[in-house]
Amino acid sequence: MAPKRSIRDEIQWRAKVTFGIVFLIGSLVAAQIFVIQVFQKKKWMAKVEKVQRKPMKIRAQRGNIFAADGRSLLATSVPRYRVGIDVTRAKPAYFKAKIDSLSNLMSSFFQDRSAEEYKELITSARREKKLIFVALGNRLVDYQERQKIKRFPFFREGAMKGGGKFEQLERRVMPFDDMALRSIGKLDRDTQTKGDFGIEFSFNNYLAGRDGVGFFQRLAGGVWKPVNDSPEVRPEAGLDVVTTIDVNFQDIVESALRNQVINTNAKYGSAIVMEIATGEIKAITNLSRRGGADSTKKFYLEDFNYAVRGGTDPGSTFKLATMVALLEKAKIDLDDNAGFCGGSIMHNKTEMTCSEEHGNQTVRQVFEHSCNIGIYNLVKNHFGFNNADNFVSYLTRFKLDQPVGFQLKGETEPIIKNRKSSTFSNTTIPWMSIGYETRLTPLQMLTFYNAIANNGHWVQPLIVKEVREADRIIEKFEANQDPTPICSERTAKLAQEMMKGVVANGTAQNINTGFCKVAGKTGTSRKRENGYVKNQYYTAFIGFFPADNPKYSCAVIIDEPQGVNLYARDVAAPVFRTIADKIFAYDVALHPAKNKPSNIQKIETQEQAGYAEDFRTVGEELGLQNTPSTAGWVKASRNGNAVSWKRVEDTKDLPNVGGMTLRDAMHILENKGFRVRYSGLGKVAEFAIVQPKVVALVLK
């Protein structure tokens, strides 16, 4: 039997065993570390990178949308910031000392929560440790607001010490607010990366650019930052789009339309201004009534593009197409007899009425008075109602049966019935000839009127003219122009004359005012909802200006006006008048040229007098040959076809300062010891000694 070990030996033995086990484990760990670092390094680093690093999309900068001048921004992308705080960063003492101050400042800045609510929001998040990043405020802030918030507690200490953070986001803004909103468009609400409607949608491929790809590393708090400054695939910025819209015209049109739709409590309004020769849309606006008809709750905003998508019966504005077809087919003259209007007529047991009994009329008067019965008689006599294809063929020639091919997507298809149409009947042609049983948009009707103002030459409307990369033109757009006129020049001139007559003698005499002579056609159609609705009208005025030398065509539409005067002459036509007058005043190229006065006439009118050396200096800068050769004070006068300069006598008595500026006159008089009093503005017209050594000047 082996002797029993002492306690000391037992302890030593156990210590050796424990040491051996620890040594063995340590050796195994060291060996494993060696294996991992030497043989398995790539494997494990790849796994770490997969978790902590990953490729992420780098969003491309979206292109700008410019007005026609290429400088005024209609839409652009700017940085906006989401404000938040990492509640774990601040030390307890600092948090306790500054939380009240931060809460008060945030409440005052955003005005969405009370200071107590902000304090509870941040404090509870810090206590519960569930949310690291707490968003503050109910909106994004711009750069200037960001700089202000950076001075608040928690933010001025930086993100690592105080926890205040700003998350940068790109947001699309319109510097001119909602000007031409439905035409310019907006981005989709969810991703803010692609156009939702308007130019933003139709030209998204140009504007969007191409996103890049780069590697990002995850930091504490779930924040990702770029690994390096060189992304794997660089983002390509979007291209800029230059529109045809003139911001000054747009402001004129929007203001005029808004005032009228508000005054008439209309359902909606739309207006377009188009340059006749080029087809460029210089202004386009659409306003819809929202919030109900109650005057205390209603408001108007641009949420639907009626100009492009609002197809309906055009009413009497369609009579121009009917008259052009008659002029083309029958070669009638404007003073030919068009028959008798008794106020109504029966057609296949259906009554067609007119606004009044016009009696016997000429072709010109039928159009000027917008006589339904007169149109009926003319169409019946020259086309007949049995052969629909004959009349419709002219409408096809006028391109009224097809979209204009506008650059904005979503244009409504027009409806011009023919014998194959499912709803064609024996009343279709008579009622179509006066503007019913059709569907046309304001832009489609305006394009036809524009062709008539352009002497029969059809031009496609255009709203985007260039795509640019900085100052370099990438793609240029020009309006399609049909080389074949839609009608003869004779017909176009006669149609223009009839439209002038509408304003001078017809249904739009109330706008025969102002400096700019206009021409056009009124149109009032009854609204249809399971039959015609009483006292609900679609009103329009379409025409061009200046009437004798057309440069712009314009359409004004106001739907369902309310009040006493509900017809186009009282609702839509005055808006056209306002637009024409203001554009005429703004566009000086529309004003008739005047003979400029010669230099001799200018000098004689101004009766200029002054210091000879000053005149010589001015003459050298302006390239004038006739300048004074003498020294001292001189005055200009006319000598036949030339200008002569006479020296102003410098006597001891009162000098001749007539025609001088106040500065020159005071210089001479004060050097002679006179004190000067003066009244008026301009140059010295009268001067006299009123007291000893006191001279009074009258300036005119």
Image (tube, rainbow, N blue to C red):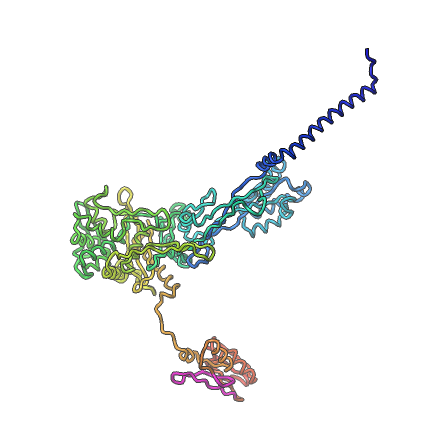
Residue 616 appears in the picture as rendered: yes
Residue 281 point in image, percent of width and height = 37, 56
Give the quadrant of the N terminus.
top right
Instruction: In this rendered view, identify the residue nearer to me: 189 or 688.
Output: 189
Residue 283 point in image, percent of width and height = 38, 56
Residue 302 appears in the picture as rendered: no
Instruction: In this rendered view, identify the residue nearer to me: 102 or 282.
Output: 282
Residue 429 point in image, percent of width and height = 21, 48
Residue 436 point in image, percent of width and height = 25, 48
Q: Which residues are magenta?
A: 628-650
Q: State left or right for residue 444 relative to residue 387.
A: right
Answer with the quarter of the image where residue 40 lies. top right
Q: Residue at x 75, y 24 (%)?
A: 20
Instruction: In this rendered view, identify the residue nearer to me: 539 or 432.
Output: 432
Give the quadrant of the C terminus.
bottom left
As drawn, which residue projects farthest toward the front? 39
